[in-house]
Image (cartoon, rainbow, N blue to C red):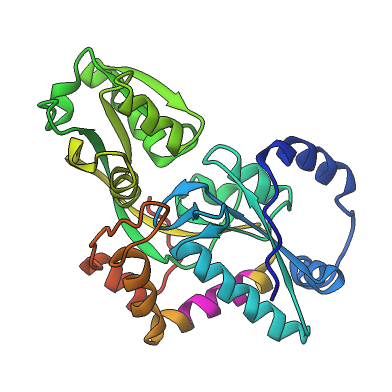
Amino acid sequence: MSFPTSLTARTFAALIAFAAIAAPQGARAQSPILEQIRESGTIMMGYREGALPFSFSDIKGQPSGYAVDLCLRVAEAARQKLGLKDLKVRWLPLTAQSRVPAVMNGLVAVDCAPNTNTAERQRQVAFSVSHYVSVVRMLVRADSGIQSFGDLRGKVVVTSVGSTGDRHVRRLKAQYAYNDVYAKDHNESFLLLESGRAQAFVLDDVVLYGLRANSKNPAQYTVAGPALSVERNALMLPKSDPEWKQLVDQTLTSVFAGPDVVALQKRWFQQPIGPRGINLALTPSPEVLAAWKHPTDEATE
């Protein structure tokens, strides 16, 4: 398969408008997505530019990460199913806020990121079986003295708009009397913490570890606080295309059942990765191992 340069985020609004106008009406093939892939010889996939180790831009600006690798296996499965000699993969950078509209409007066949599968989101989009399990906590400066949400009174807490952290920050604001701000993506959220404009950053812990490890001085930051929720991470898919979801789920289940998932875990969580060549040194938790052994698309809540 060939891998063209990803589309820029600036094209997102225009693509949304085009998709709304050009979306075909009436009956289509059993799997509209597979039919579109067959006709175009191309599959469009979404990714994050700063959600290491799941989905991020590497030193050459190309999509990389654990979820990206899983999506490439899905693309190969689609190519084989359709009997195509070649399949081009095109990438669209998305944020936590833009991912749902992009999937709903058919701009991407799948979003390759640590998307939390929730009952609320399932009303708009579908999810694959879970590919990882993480915990929502907070990233703080190591010298801040912040160990729990009780230490945040009067301080500024940041998270990325549309993320699972967004939900928790809004929910707990009145109880702990902090000030909340919402950044457009994870990199901007971390910048607010790094510059001192925020004192805590709430998000999935694995992504927080990735952002910390990729910072100029990782020792300055620590992941702290209680587990606000356990998150089942999955690939995000358009609704109403069960044949496409079945192909995605079968591909992931096959990966999880063999040695490939162990190799992926070691590559992205236990070896140097990213522009700085950092090693998260994270082994799979019992919850992650259970998600691989018993694949499910059950929502977190």
Pick whichever, 109 or 267, lies toward us: 267
In the rendered image, is residue 159 in sight?
A: no
Q: Is-magenta flag for residue 104?
A: no
Q: Which residue is drawn at 31% across and 52% down?
A: 206
Asked whether, in this view, residue 16 is left or right of residue 212, the answer is right
| Number of callouts | 0
**Residue nearer the viewer, 86 or 238:** 86
Horizontally, is 193 left or right of 142 in the view? right
Q: What stretch is highlighted in magenta?
A: 245-253
Give the answer, above or below, for where 177 lies relative to 118. above
The residue positioned 25% from the left and 37% from the top of the image is 138
| Residue in front for this viewpoint, 197 or 67 | 197
Q: Where is the N terminus found, in terms of image quarters?
A: bottom right
Residue 113 in the image: x percent, y percent? 49, 55
At x 50%, y 55%, the residue is 58
User: Hey, which quadrant is residue 139 in on the image?
Assistant: top left
**What percent of the width, then of the height, locates residue 127?**
53, 60
Note whether 215 is above or below 231 in the view shown: above
**x, y percent for residue 64:** 50, 60
Position in image of residue 293 (x %, y %): 33, 79
Residue 118 appears anywhere in the view: yes
Q: Is residue 152 above or below residue 7?
A: above
Most common SS among magenta residues: helix
Residue extending farthest top: 154
